[in-house]
Amino acid sequence: MLEKRIIVCLDVREGKTTKGIKFRGNVDIGDPVEMARSYYHGGVDELVFYDITASSEHRSVMLDVVAEVARQIFVPFSVGGGIATVDQMRNVLLAGAEKVSVNSQAVKDPLIIDQGAAAFGNQCVVLGMDVQADGEMPSGYRVVINGGRAPTDRDALQWALEAVDRGAGEIVLNSIDADGTTSGYDCRVTRMISESVSVPVVASGGAGTPQHVAEVFCDGAADAALVASMVHYGRYSIADIKRYLAADGIAVRLDGLV
Amino acid sequence: MSVGIVDYEAGNLKSVETALLALGARIVISDRPEVLLQADRLIFPGVGDAAAAMRVLKARGLDQAIVQFVNSGRPVLGICLGSQIVLDASEENSAVCLGLVPGIARRFAPDSGLKIPHMGWNQVEPTADHYLFSAIPSGTSFYFVHSYYPQPQDSAAVIGCTDYGVRFTAALCRDNLAAVQFHPEKSGRYGLRMLQNFLEYRA
């Protein structure tokens, strides 16, 4: 049986991680490679790195991080943040990432999804989408871009369907309303998107407890769950989350838990 | 001891390369038959389209090189798409494949209600005593990303199975040739263990 994935998200700015003040052990909390190693040895199923570097001249630093992560961890990982061209996608994949995610840029120029899928295969192209509840939209959710700051005229469900049609092999669905609240994922929008598209959907935004993760698998029909602050600040380990899920009857990978 | 990795523009070789280097292997990545035929063992990884992969293999004479390598008795490992193109054919764009193992690659039924591709960790149950699974517990999870799966004609070729709506062949073999549908290079410590088993295998 396919297991539900727990994916840790690391924000990286100019080569340094930006969260993790209470990270366990002797890990340099500013070092994305060290943090990735720690999560890898703790049983994480996958990792996501978001490059939040503001200026484009420092973007090459991220490629060094990607290459070093690839040398040290042996689970899949994806890279996103500011990816705007097929060449940038290629650089990230050649550095050793399995997948590359596009978000705002794909809304502005959807052809990047088609081009990425044609060049590297659908399984390499992840659509990241930020959504916000909005009664004026047909599905009840609006796509927002630029880190949630800029509303668009796109309906969340329509955009998800279009992106999959264009070749996105996975969707990371982030609820702007839930993001940062640690009061739980938006299971409603997650279920709506997940049950409408043919590709896996990764729920993002709002996780605060293992119970929230269980909810988004059961009520939200998510295929995977992104976690960040609940593990970065040391409140829970990957093992804590997975053991909770397993006790709840949810299939997870239990190998390698510490 | 050197390990040849077949470069045929079928997806990312980087993760296979880094995993083998982490295990201390000496590797040679090439798209040239004469270079690869010098290696002591051979890996052909790959993701993507079976028909496109076969076109590239043929254009470079790599199809014959792989067959020749297998027939030489040296250890060969196919990964992901590599587990499909060893068969006679694939349903993917009606590709004619290498014909090393009788059988075809089938697509997961789109009306099954299951997400396609089959992406993520799933348990593999060894169905035969094969060196690849040495020191790996039955039911260990490996990382999969695929929409087609190998279906060997002869059940004796099957060495590992996985459930995803259907029970499908996740690992297969023919003599010195073994192939896995999942990605050992991305499957944590047991994935590395499997690659190490391949590196240590004495035919």
Image (spheres, coloured by chain):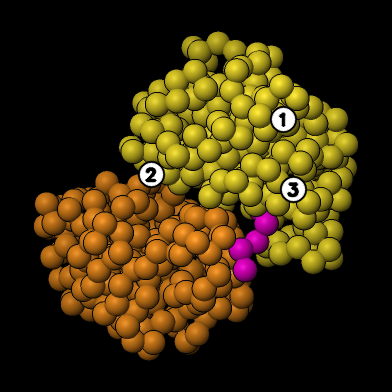
Chain colours: A yellow, B orange
Between disc 2 and disc 3, the foreground one is 3
Callout 1 secondary element: loop
Q: Amino acid at mark 1?
A: Gly
Which residue is at 68% across, 43% downward?
A192
Residue B105 lies in quadrant? bottom left
From this viewpoint, is residue B2 visible?
no
Q: Chain of mark 1?
A: A
Q: What is the distance, in whole Å, between disc 2 and disc 3 at their CAs?
A: 27 Å
Q: Can you give x and y, in whole percent of width and height, for residue B180 in the image?
A: 42, 68
Question: Along the polypeptide, which appears first: circle 1 or circle 2?
Answer: 2
Question: Along the polypeptide, which appears first: circle 2 or circle 3?
Answer: 2
Q: Amino acid at mark 2?
A: Gly
Between disc 1 and disc 3, the foreground one is 1
Q: Identify which residue, A100 or A194, lies in the foreground.
A: A194
User: Relative to B5, does residue B76 appear above or below in the rendering?
Assistant: below
Residue, disc 2: A121
Callout 2 secondary element: loop
Residue B9 is left or right of residue A180, and the answer is: left
CB atoms of marks 2 and 3 within 8 Å: no
Residue A220's mark?
3
User: Range of the magenta residues?
Assistant: A1-7
Q: What is the distance, in whole Å, between disc 1 and disc 3 at their CAs?
A: 16 Å
Q: Chain of mark 3?
A: A
Query: Alpha-carbon neighbours of circle 3 within 10 Å: few (<14), some, or many (≥20)?
Result: many
Query: Alpha-carbon neighbours of circle 2 within 10 Å: few (<14), some, or many (≥20)?
Result: many
Q: Identify which residue, B36 or B163, lies in the foreground.
A: B163
Residue A112 lies in quadrant? top left
Which residue is at 12% across, 52% downward?
B60
Which residue is at 30% across, 72% downward?
B104
